[in-house]
Amino acid sequence: MRLHQLAAAAALTLALAACASSGGLHPEGTPTDPSTLQAGRSLAQLSAAAWPSTDWWTGLDDRQLDALIAEALQDNPGLGVADARAHAAQAEAGIADAARGPSVNGTAAVSGARPPAALLGDKAHFAVAKYGYASFKWDLDPWGGKRAAWEAALGQARAAEVDARAARIELSGNVARAYVQLGYAFTQQDLADAELQRAGSARELTRQRVAAGIDNQVALKQGDAEVASAEQQAALARRAVEAARSSLAVLLGKGPDRGLQLERPRRLAPAALAVPANLPLELVGHRADLVAARWRVEAAGKDIKVAKTEFLPDISIGAMAGLVSMGGANPLSLAGRFFQVGPSLSLPIFDGGRLRANLAGKDAQYDLAVAQYNQTLVGALNQVADELSALKSLQTQIAAQQRAQDAAQQAWELAEQRYQAGIGSYLEALSVRQQLLATERGSAALEAQQADLSVQLIQALGGGYQPRTDAAAATPSLTPSRS
């Protein structure tokens, strides 16, 4: 008897030694500390200031733009996609939370059967079985795996919620950028029409000079070419206005006729922005994409814990009680009673490496989430620095372009004075006018680019995103369990 006991103990020891193990598996990714990203030289010229407000576009003082952004936030169908994803993620979190509690089920059934006569002979006859029972089960979750699964699902739900808010921030910025583009398109149309008028007047003067024998056909054909080119540019400018109207209609979630109802935008003054000196650290909390990426890292870390608890014993409590009877005319007659209650324990011993492969996959998913967070963080900081550099360059370009436009304006005025004084010809004056229109086109393009970059900078700084005030939601941990 003692030999049998020793053999059983040895067998149990070997079985436990062969149990699936998570040893040696852990994630490799490490989230980047924002304070380690060097940005002092790129942002040295900036002073501290408030971040963009939630309704930053109202600072542009354009009521039509305010109304368009409100309309887009109300009707754009893309927001419904983001909201549906957030609701689906919240439902998944609810399912994971419900799995942590006990479950109670009830069943009742009536069935009839006649066993084969070959088995029971004369005793075989049709019989009715009636039964009803209730069951109770509760997984105790001693290692916290189910809680970790709920926390992982909750992290994904919070990330999806932030994504939905990010979609609104991106939409408001895109409407403002499309609005700037529409205003620029109208300006280009005015300049193209002015150039067409100038080219037509110059061509008519050239025709008169050819008829008088002062000029030749070469000058006239050059005039024809200028008119044709101006007509092409005017048509292109009109098409740009139509395209800008259509783009805004799409963002508003409306048909093309909605774009035709838009009034011509007035000139927008680019927002004057300064950036906080502690940008790398503060940027993490002011950009929705970074907050969502942090939540996904947190959720991936919880998934690792769930995978590790699958290597440990699972303990649950179950109970069942019911009534049963065979035969009888009364379908509600349940004479026999039965019940059972007791705990159960299960431990994975051999699974062909499934659990280790699952854990390795969760580690890889964590590393992926970390890499995506790091990539987003580095990209966000460099995006801000690049757009600030571009705006600084544009300020220099605009100042130089303004000097060129002022000089061209003065040249045009002098050319008109010479013509009126009988010193120069009006054809010479129209040639100077062409230079002025070219500088005005350059100024309009630079100003539109400056306004567009200003909106992009607002988006890069978070677009007015305000994280949730509760600490748990605002500052998710980025450190996984490596035990």
Image (cartoon, helix red, strand yellow):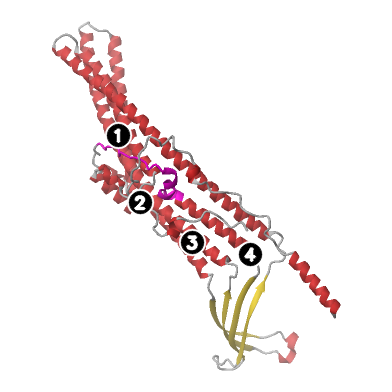
Of the residues shown, which amino acid type is indicated by label 4?
Glu
Of the residues shown, which amino acid type is indicated by label 1?
Ala
Q: Quadrant of residue 11?
A: bottom right
Dot 4 or dot 2: first in sequence order is 2
Dot 4 or dot 1: first in sequence order is 1
Q: Horizontal placement of 456 versus 329: left or right?
A: left
How much space separates mark 1 and mark 3, taking CA atoms? 46 Å
Determine which residue is flagged by label 1.
185
Query: Residue 401, how many percent across, how many down?
Result: 30, 24
Q: Horizontal placement of 210 versus 306: left or right?
A: left
* Residue interval drawn in magenta: 267-290
How much space separates mark 4 and mark 1, taking CA atoms? 62 Å
Determine which residue is flagged by label 4.
310
In the picture, the disc for residue 76 is: 2
Q: Please say if the residues under marks 1 and 3 sit with CB atoms less than 8 Å apart.
A: no
Q: Horizontal placement of 126 versus 54: left or right?
A: right
Q: Classify mark 4: helix, strand or loop.
A: loop
Disc 3 versus disc 2: nearer the observer: 3
Dot 3 or dot 2: first in sequence order is 2
The residue depicted at 30 percent of the width and 37 percent of the height is 270
Q: Classify mark 3: helix, strand or loop.
A: helix
Determine which residue is flagged by label 3.
154
Dot 3 or dot 4: first in sequence order is 3
How much space separates mark 4 and mark 2, taking CA atoms? 44 Å
Q: Foreground residue, 186 or 111?
A: 186
Q: Tell me if residue 39 comes above or below residue 482 in the rendering.
A: above
Mark 2 packing: few (<14 Cα in 10 Å), some, or many (20+)? some
Q: Horizontal placement of 376 versus 364: left or right?
A: left
Q: Foreground residue, 19 or 476?
A: 476
Of the residues shown, which amino acid type is indicated by label 2?
Asn
How much space separates mark 1 and mark 2, taking CA atoms? 24 Å
